[in-house]
Image (cartoon, coloured by chain):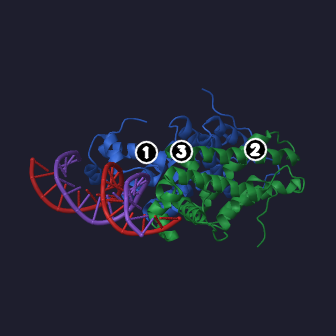
Chain colours: A blue, B green, C red, D purple
Amino acid sequence: MEPPITKAGAILDSAERLARIAGYNGFSFRDVAAEVGIKSASVHYHFPTKSDLGAALARRYADRFFARLGDPSDLAHPSHTLIERFIAGFRDTLAIDGQMCLCGLFGAEIAALPEAVGAEVRSFFERAIDWLETAYGRASRGIVGDDTAPRDRALALIATLEGALILARTLQDPAIFDRVAASAVPGWRPPPR
Amino acid sequence: MEPPITKAGAILDSAERLARIAGYNGFSFRDVAAEVGIKSASVHYHFPTKSDLGAALARRYADRFFARLGDPSDLAHPSHTLIERFIAGFRDTLAIDGQMCLCGLFGAEIAALPEAVGAEVRSFFERAIDWLETAYGRASRGIVGDDTAPRDRALALIATLEGALILARTLQDPAIFDRVAASAVPGWRPPPR
DNA sequence: GTCTATAATTTGATAGAC
DNA sequence: GTCTATCAAATTATAGAC
């Protein structure tokens, strides 16, 4: 992660790291302030309420996630690499950040989130479904005999990858993510290096 | 859910319901006490610390889950029904309780849990993997061409079902669970009624 | 077993000086 | 923008009466 340019960016970086460990109710303005090196009152200046901060967290997380993925309609991306790009998005969460997907965690606690935060989390998953649906539409060389609709395949892959993060972290073995992904997507192999 | 017989049981019922909404950091002794109709000090009598309560919660959840599933080696269970029994275990969590899997949610926050709680959550997933591995070993009529190891198939199905709960709840559509399950397990159909 | 009372800390949030 | 100061409420937990 590049060093933050703005103070708001630094706050979001810190809050995201903490939220991805302990969830929405597991981090505080004081935790974030201490990490950033300011006081909690100053955090409130940038994000008036915790709901504001939580929503900004989820929105930025989603924007960054899909910016890295790129446009699935873009012909510059060979269609056969689209699915592995998507998987890599989740895999990096574990391999690089060593953390849970923010929206996966927030999604698990969705019923306890302020409405504004929940809306952003929902938006993340809707965008993910649309992205994958488009990707499956292009890479339409499905396995022979698999007549599952692209949208259902999208739902299933997203569910599997979120669950794979939970499993790999709980059992403290990142390789579990790769084994799950390989088992869910025939032909997929973990990237080298 | 049958009405609790003991006070400790009533406490666990209430705490489980709350924890499955908001996670480990999202419920308090006072919340639980208020639901049960006692004072928070009385909850401490039954469960001295929150870590004790959390661990008891996860352990009871796991015991109940696997008691309902039964022994996958038991020949009384036709092998072709084992996988759908397992799926039903997760599906009921949504269809009956309308809630997240307790250990799925706790697993997502694993790095923030007291060690004693994390150990119980880990145990839940290890038991789930063993159960499914045994089931896949018996129902060895895998799809032609699928040479995935039973243990990896187990990991993948558990991940998919946990993720399906997150997706279905976040997008507020229980049918999503069924579509994911059907897409992950060819031939599976949601139970009638 | 449950209560009252309370301790010690943390929480989200605000007022107002600089 | 950040600070000090502060608030009201909530948190986990304990002591001790009943």
Image vertical order of residue C2 relative to residue B144, above or below: below
Q: In which quarter of the image is residue A24?
A: bottom left
Whether residue B159 sits left or right of residue A65 in the image: it is right
Residue A11: percent from the left, percent from the top? Answer: 34, 45
* Near-viewer residue (B64 or B99): B64
* Near-viewer residue (B164 or A85): B164
| Label 3 or label 1, whichever comes before in sequence order | 1
Q: Distance between the residues labelled 3 and 1?
A: 11 Å
At label 2, which amino acid type do we have?
A: Asp
Residue A106 visible, this orientation: yes
> Tag on residue A100?
3
What is the quadrant of the C terminus of chain B in the image?
Answer: bottom right
- Marks 3, 1 in one chain: yes
What is the quadrant of the N terminus of chain B in the image?
Answer: bottom right
- Marks 3, 2 in one chain: no
> Tag on residue B130?
2
Q: Distance between the residues labelled 3 and 2?
A: 24 Å
CB contact under 8 Å: marks 3 and 2: no
> Tag on residue A18?
1
Whether residue B159 sits left or right of residue A40 in the image: it is right
